[in-house]
Image (cartoon, grey):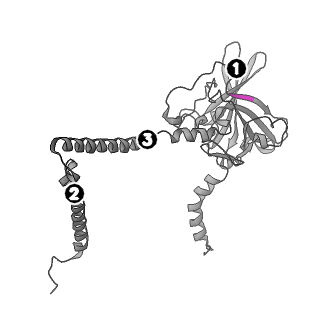
Amino acid sequence: MRISNTPAEAALLSTFLFPFLSAAVGNIDCNHVRVDKTSFDLSPLGGPRSVLHSVDLGVSLQNTTYTIDICRPLERAADVPKEQQCPGGTRVCGIERVINKQDQKSMLDKVIPIAGELKNQGGGVLDAKWILLSNSGSHADSEKEGLRLEAHGGFFGSGKEKKTQTAIVEFLCDKERTGLENLWNSEDQYTEKRKRADGDDSEPLVDDKDLPSLTFVKYDTSRPSEDILRLEWRTKHACIGAKEEKDAEQGHRWGFFTWFILIAFLSTATYLIFGSWLNYNRYGARGWDLLPHGDTIRDVPYLLKDWIRRVVNTVQGGGSRGGYAAV
């Protein structure tokens, strides 16, 4: 194998390989999350999902909405000013507002891109890491079933005051929850470019419990150079074996093409059996004469052979001169 050693060849090679390398490094495939030989399908949780953390400051409220999309970068609505949204490539975004209790007026205070592919925006790379909670080595996690996502790339501030951001999301097994119950309806509207699982366009199921499936745990700003956001997400899709059960269930569902072949086969078989029975009882037919249109069926191999011969002759005769030799 020859290795490119000229600048032009190297540039051309990187142009073709860069999209594949970018997809392979630090990306999240929410349809197939593989952790310690265990597979999870978190695609039903895809789309912008928000959680609210509110702090009472006395005369005002400090409301921070954290929005996450584990399947693709967040994309704000087109009419939102650039300074009021996280940059492109953000997977986890925090938007902080201060609300005056007296007049209920809201003022935007901070926009914090916490995780994403933000190297070209002043941050870093997503560098997503998955850990199975039961294998994390922590005594507190030993009795938990689920997985943990650690995502990087975010930043806040500039210069010497710039701090990196990290999002840690624990997906906990809860067989009674889809993961979409009672989520915060954020005023920060995002576009949702995904189809619901199994083509279901209905609204998410609503649990009677007051606790949302996605909850805020902590936003730790005590470290000098890094802030860490911790979220907790309860869902049945974080249960071990959930993906296998879903795949098995979908495997039993037949598509339109399968049903078409099955119905066509049964219809043909019914026609042949009923026609043969009718010919036997009405005309006392035997052998090939039992089959309806038996003469046509017997001629099928010869008709097919003749058709193939015509096709071959047409192809072979395409370059001829109509039987005349050149003078």
Residue 44 percent across, percent down from the top left:
58, 35
Front residue (pair 77, 74):
74
Q: Are marks 1 and 3 in contact (CB under 8 Å)?
A: no
Number of labelled discs? 3
Residue 326 percent across, percent down from the top left:
17, 85
Main SS of the magenta segment?
loop
User: How would you rate the neighbour count of disc 1 (Cα within 10 Å): few for under 14, some for 14-19, many for 20 or more?
Assistant: some
Residue at point 25%, 73% (across, down): 316
Q: Amino acid at mark 3?
A: Gly
Q: What residue would you read off at disc 1?
A: 99
Residue 293 percent across, percent down from the top left:
19, 49
Front residue (pair 153, 36):
36
Q: Secondary structure at mark 3?
A: loop
Quadrant placement of the N terminus: bottom right
Mark identifier at residue 298 = 2
Residue 250 in the image: above or below residue 5: above
Is 266 displayed left or right of 63 in the figure? Answer: left
User: How would you rate the neighbour count of disc 2 (Cα within 10 Å): few for under 14, some for 14-19, many for 20 or more?
Assistant: few
Q: What residue would you read off at disc 3?
A: 255
Residue 106 in the image: above or below residue 110: above
Residue at point 53%, 25% (across, down): 203
Q: Amino acid at mark 1?
A: Ile
**What separation in Å lies between label 2 and label 1 (alpha carbons)?**
85 Å
Figure quadrant of residue 154:
top right
Tell which tag, 3 or 2, sits nearer the viewer: 2
- Chain part drawn in magenta: 209-216
Mark 3 vs mark 2: which is more N-terminal?
A: 3
Tell which tag, 1 or 3, sits nearer the viewer: 3
